[in-house]
Image (cartoon, helix red, strand yellow):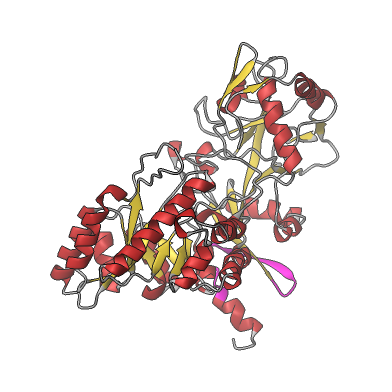
């Protein structure tokens, strides 16, 4: 984790000027080999943007098979039963959902329409879990189809019981109960408030309701949605769920396991040293303003107070050592203090508990890129080079993260390129002064010109369409699925792609 307060390192400060004059500051993106190979087909990509417009999102749905398998391999390693749930929330691609139906995975939906899309793609009720805030229409559809519900609050539980009666639901409704507000006498930390879940202080009332309605509710287990970056805090939440699950069994309930949600990181940067150098250089550039590395010296969360760099980053960590399924393996292999040092996996096996996970971001790792056409270049009043893209901040933005890695550039005219000695910023097509695509300066070899393409890597999870908007009547990005079949790449419109047809052709059954 990065320190919130750090002294200025003069040697790093020198590198700011060196980066601008001699060696540009780099933060290369981690990129899947399949995507890297496809991006070599530059004319095909130029043609796709001509055909479908800018911005354009390219989806690589087949990569999800590798991501899912990395998690199921951890289940096999620890001899666990349960289910991995693919989460639809981070991306609205139909191609990804359809591809997921062919994999060993359930689906976690968080709205009525997402439930309809999942069922339409081929997920049956036994593979669906409904999470998130729920209105009556969402609950009604879920109850009518017998899908599993992850209960978020007491009002929701009461509404489910009333709707069951009104809808004449005969079988039991499968439910998880989501908890929040975890604390520990062993580890002192400030428990962050959350809009998700029922506070653990109400656990006795939860038990009372589960017991009084066990003829109508099939209690699957407890769950949590935990955003803490501290591994110790997450382990405390796991211990708490295990303790309450055992208590539920002693009360005559029959929980099947526990659901530890998601929060498994992914790695955006290719090189660890480049990432650490990038953050150090960014912080130390705030000491001298002859070479700014972020728009209007905003600091991206950092600030200079009398030679001391203070603050905290308003961007996610782009390089993490433990990602995705490796993170799950870490928790499963961790000894738990409340259980005499037995590991999480040992307790699950000893108690015959199943494990459920919802790795939303990490299952979408490397599944997509966002492409924008260059509209113009200009020089700002502070002599910064600005590259105007035919996209806006809603087309590549999230509510809580910034993508800082260097984009890939496709030049239409490679013979008349202009060198880029001092870096540049990418701006959007909205008539708004704050429509910045990148608040951090990037240093490509050449300045993109009108008609060139700029490609941002790994935007499928929460970035490419999570907050997209038709503000000022600008277009939102279309999605094109890129698949590898018979040793060549093929493209399909996102809503047309059908992995079943490809499987039939591969088996000569079509």
Q: Is residue 313 left or right of residue 130?
A: right
Residue at left 70%, top 49%?
A: 30
Pick the front one: 263 or 58: 263
Residue at left 52%, top 68%?
A: 100
Q: Residue furthest bottom?
A: 509
Q: Position of residue 331 (x, y in %)?
A: 54, 57
Q: Residue furthest top?
A: 306
Pick the front one: 361 or 150: 150
Is residue 173 rendered magenta in the image?
A: no
Q: In the rendered image, which quarter is residue 287 located in?
A: top right
Q: Is residue 373 above or below residue 364?
A: above
Q: State which quarter of the image contains the N terminus.
A: top right
Magenta residues (range): 485-499
Q: In the rendered image, which quarter is residue 314 located in?
A: top right
Q: Is residue 327 left or right of residue 83?
A: right
Q: Is residue 278 visible?
A: yes
Q: State which quarter of the image contains the C terminus.
A: bottom right
Q: Position of residue 365 (x, y in %)?
A: 60, 55
Q: In the rendered image, which quarter is residue 409 located in?
A: top right
Q: Is residue 456 above or below residue 307?
A: below
Q: Position of residue 482 (x, y in %)?
A: 64, 62
Q: How many marks?
A: 0
Q: Is residue 162 left or right of residue 197?
A: left
Is residue 497 rendered magenta in the image?
A: yes
């Amino acid at each position: 984790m990065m320190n919130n307060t750090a002294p200025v390192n003069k040697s790093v400060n020198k590198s700011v000027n060196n980066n601008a004059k001699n060696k540009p500051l780099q933060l290369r993106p981690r990129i899947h080999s399949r995507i890297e190979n496809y991006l070599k087909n530059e004319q095909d990509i130029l043609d796709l943007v001509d055909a479908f417009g800018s911005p354009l999102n390219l989806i690589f749905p087949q990569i999800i098979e590798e991501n899912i398998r990395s998690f199921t391999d951890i289940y096999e390693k620890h001899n666990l039963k349960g289910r991995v749930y693919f989460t639809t929330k981070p991306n609205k691609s139909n191609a990804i959902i359809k591809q997921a139906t062919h994999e060993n995975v359930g689906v976690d939906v968080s709205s009525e329409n997402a439930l309809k899309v999942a069922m339409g793609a081929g997920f049956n009720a036994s593979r669906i879990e409904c999470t998130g805030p729920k209105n009556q229409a969402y609950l009604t559809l879920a109850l009518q189809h017998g899908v599993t519900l992850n209960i978020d609050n007491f009002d929701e539980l009461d509404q489910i019981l009333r709707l069951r009666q009104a809808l004449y639901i005969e079988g039991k409704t499968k439910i998880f109960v989501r908890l929040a507000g975890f604390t520990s006498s062993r580890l002192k930390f400030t428990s962050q408030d959350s809009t998700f879940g029922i506070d653990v202080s109400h656990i006795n009332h939860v038990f009372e309701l589960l017991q009084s309605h066990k003829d109508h509710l099939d209690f699957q287990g407890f769950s949590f949605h935990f955003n803490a970056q501290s591994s110790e805090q997450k382990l405390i939440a796991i211990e708490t769920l295990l303790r309450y699950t055992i208590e539920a069994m002693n009360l005559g309930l029959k929980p099947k396991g526990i659901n530890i949600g998601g929060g498994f990181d992914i790695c955006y940067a290719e090189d660890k040293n480049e990432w650490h150098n990038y953050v150090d250089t960014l912080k130390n550039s705030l000491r001298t303003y002859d070479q700014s590395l972020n728009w209007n010296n905003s600091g991206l969360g950092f600030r200079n107070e009398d030679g001391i760099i203070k603050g905290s980053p308003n961007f996610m960590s782009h390089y993490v050592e433990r990602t995705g399924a490796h993170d799950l393996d870490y928790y499963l292999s961790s000894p738990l203090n409340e259980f005499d040092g037995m590991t999480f996996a040992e307790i699950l096996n000893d108690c015959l508990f199943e494990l459920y996970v919802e790795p939303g971001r990490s299952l979408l790792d490397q599944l997509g890129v966002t492409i924008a056409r260059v509209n113009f270049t200009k020089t700002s009043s502070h002599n910064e080079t600005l590259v105007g893209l035919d996209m806006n901040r809603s087309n590549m933005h999230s509510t809580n993260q910034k993508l800082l890695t260097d984009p890939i550039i496709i030049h239409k005219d490679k013979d008349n390129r202009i060198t880029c000695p001092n870096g540049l910023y990418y701006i959007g097509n909205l008539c708004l002064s704050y429509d910045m695509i990148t608040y951090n300066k990037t240093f490509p070899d050449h300045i993109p010109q009108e008609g060139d393409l700029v490609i941002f890597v790994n935007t499928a999870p929460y970035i490419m369409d999570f907050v997209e908007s038709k503000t000022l009547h600008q277009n939102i990005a279309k999605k094109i699925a890129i698949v590898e079949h018979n040793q060549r790449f093929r493209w399909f419109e996102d809503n047309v792609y059908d992995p079943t047809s490809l499987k039939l052709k591969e088996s000569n059954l079509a």
